[in-house]
Image (cartoon, grey):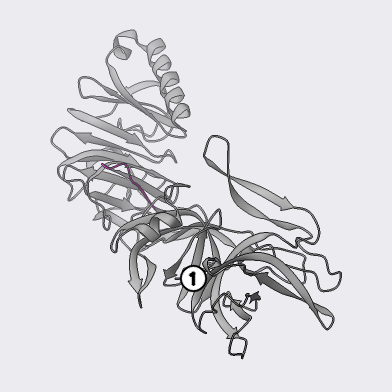
Amino acid sequence: MLNRMLATKFVLFLLLLTTSSVFAANIIDVEAGDYHSVALNSDGTVWAWGAGNLGNGTTSSSSIPVQVTGLTDVVSVSVSVEAGHSLAVKSDGSVWAWGRNDCGQLGDETTTDKTTPVKVTMLTDVVSVACGGLHSLAVKSDGTVWAWGYNSSGQLGDGTKTTRKSPVQVTGLTDIVAVDGDNGHSMALRNDGVVFVWGTILSMDHITTPSAVVAPGSKNVSDSRKAGSGNKLVLSPVVVTAKFPDCIYVEDENRTSGIKVMPVPVNANPSDIISVIAEVGTSDGEKTLSLVETADVLGSMSIAPLAMNNASLGGGDFCFNAATGSGQEGVFGWAWVKGSDGKYVKMWQKSSGLNNIGLLVTTWGKVIEIEDAVLPTWFRVSDGSDNSVIVTIPSAVSAPAIGDFVSVTGVSSCKPQGSDLIRLLKVRQQSDIVMD
């Protein structure tokens, strides 16, 4: 994206160079929309060419730059991706707009198109601006962000989907140094490098307040288990291994560590791979994560086994076909896969092989049943759905109590029960059962 932007600006510069060498020598910035372009001259004047309202008092197209009427002392410009409107910031911090205005994107409290610049109302001390498709954004010198125009997807970030004809403050953003917008969504960069998004983006619709972008591999579950209460963490990617009415459990991609997440994210189900933004805390002495962002889960995708009679608990490997007695005949789904460069890429995966007995696997869940004996030899773990597995334990290992949430690591196995095969997980030592 960055290379394409730089290439576009270089082409625009060459166009200016061929149009007027004297003019081009003083250009300090250029911005391109779908059908028109804008250039900022070092003397603070603004020039435009292409189709639509160029800001020179007409609606005529021009193949060469024409000066935008009445603008001086301009320090920053932006062009709508839909070729609808343009913005300029003057050295006194005021914002000026021209062009299409059917959604109030010019910010002058009207919906009338303008062929020359008009001042955006209620904005002062602005340092930079950005045009979205049919909305506009501005960063003030105090680091706050303001937005106006079309808002059907929440792209104004004020917690609503109400279109605005004048600027409103974007909720919860401070210390912002740059903004950008596109059709239906907006973005902001904070001074510590964190990026926020809102609107329609990724697999989520209508995020009406900003949410921090999750970078794959930014934090893992082990980090969260070690962090102190109140610390905010981003986990990506993690696997949902259990879901209950009040919480889910997630593990890291290596399935070696897990943690409880509250409350239950929308559309997060066992075997989904998700990214989580949360704050570390405790509940009844148990280390937990509390979801803290508007969009707490980003980029959910399923790795649930398909075309088998029995689903594996939490996406584990102890799954068998009752009709044939074979296991893991094929697992299909999207998954994050770490490449040789250490980066995660989204890949379509299929595992092959029959009868995956003897694999060392880890799963998370709630203890729902224990053998009624003085020295129990098994207990059952559930992921909150119809999936469960019987965990067999040797005499030297103590069983947890009913209702406990545990992480269990063992060897996958099975046993016949009537016409079915019952899934088992054989535990070898006490450390294979982790209370959390």
Residue appearing at x 24%, y 55% in the figure: 169
* Dot 1: element: strand
Query: Farthest residue in the front direction?
Result: 396
Residue 298 in the magenta stretch? The answer is no
Answer whether residue 71 is visible to the viewer in this image: no
Q: In this orientation, which residue lies closer to the viewer: 106 or 269?
A: 269
Residue appearing at x 53%, y 58% in the figure: 256
Q: Identify residue for label 1.
A: 248
Residue 415: percent from the left, percent from the top? 77, 75
Q: Quadrant of residue 259?
A: bottom left
Residue 57: percent from the left, percent from the top? 30, 33
Q: In this orientation, which residue lies closer to the viewer: 349 or 212?
A: 349
Residue 194: percent from the left, percent from the top? 33, 45
Which contiguous range is marked in magenta? 191-197
Answer whether residue 255 is visible to the viewer in this image: yes
Report the side of 61 relative to 351 (left or right).
Answer: left
Query: Farthest residue in the top direction?
Result: 21
Report the side of 99 relative to 297 (left or right).
Answer: left
Q: Quadrant of residue 50?
A: top left
Residue appearing at x 21%, y 29% in the figure: 74
Q: Which amino acid does label 1 sit on?
A: Ile
Position of 73 relative to 258 (above/below): above
Query: Farthest residue in the right direction?
Result: 324
